[in-house]
Amino acid sequence: MVKRNTCVFISGKGTNLKNLILKSRDYNFPINIKLVVCNNKKAEGIKLAKINSIPLLLVNTNKRNFENLIIKFLKKYKISFICLAGYMKIISKNFLKNFRKDIINIHPSLLPKFKGLNTFKRVLKNNEKKTGCTVHFVNEKLDGGKIIVRKSFSINKKDTELLIKNKTQKLEYIAFPEAIVKIFRNY
C-alpha cells in the first residue's frame, strides 16, 4: 500500500494527533505523518511531534505571510493530505486555492449544528438530546464542507461541558481514522 504523506495541523494538546500517529504505524493505515504544523508555541502536542521524530513547523499566524511558509513546507515534505486536529485558525481561501488537495477537519458537534467555537456550552444551552463529532472536508465555508463521518451519543441530564467534551473526544479517536480509511478506499 502506498501511504499518503500527511500533515497534521494542531493548536493544543494533540490528542487526535497522538491517535493518528499510533494508527499510522499500522501497515494498512493509508497515511504517513510527515509534518506537524502548530500555531501555538505552548501547545502540548508539540511534544508528540518531537517524541515521534516528526518535523514540526511552528507558525506565527499574526505574521502576514505565514500561509506561504506553510505551503513551502508542505511542498518540501511532499504533503498531499492535511488533517486539521484542533487547529484553531480558519484556513483561508488563498491557502485552499494554493494547496488544491484534500484537507479534512474534525469538529466536536453533529454538523451542521454548532459550527465554530464553544460547542459544548452551546449544546447544553440548547438542551440537545444528543451530540458527537463530525469529520468533514474543508472548503471556504466555516465547518461547511462535505461530511465524511459523523458519530453521536445521547446526552445524560447530569452531563457537564467537561463530560460532553470527554465523550466527544473518545468518539473523535474512532471517527477520524475511520474517515481517513473511507476517503482512501475511494481513491
Image (tube, rainbow, N blue to C red):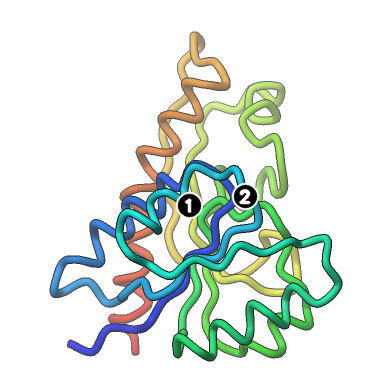
What's under tag 1, amino acid-wise?
Ile
Q: In which quarter of the image is the N terminus?
A: bottom left
Q: What element carries label 1?
A: helix
Q: Which residue is drawn at 50% across and 89% down?
A: 76
Q: Mark 1 points at which residue?
A: 46
For the point 57% across and 21% down, which residue is it? 161
Tag 2–tag 1 contact (CB < 8 Å): yes
Q: Residue at x 43, y 41 (%)?
A: 152
Label 2's element? loop
Give how far across and how far down residue 155 sits, in percent: 48, 23
Taking the spot 49% from the left edge, 26% from the top edge, the residue there is: 164
For residue 182, above or below residue 129: below
Is residue 173 found left or right of 156 in the rendered image?
left
Q: Is residue 137 above or below residue 158?
A: below
The residue indicated by pointer 2 is: 41
Q: Where does residue 48 sit, x and y in percent of width and height?
A: 38, 51
- Label 1: how many residues lie within 10 Å, few (<14), some (14-19) or many (20+)? many
Q: How far is mark 2 from mark 1, CA to CA? A: 8 Å
Q: Pick the residue in front: 51 or 30.
A: 51
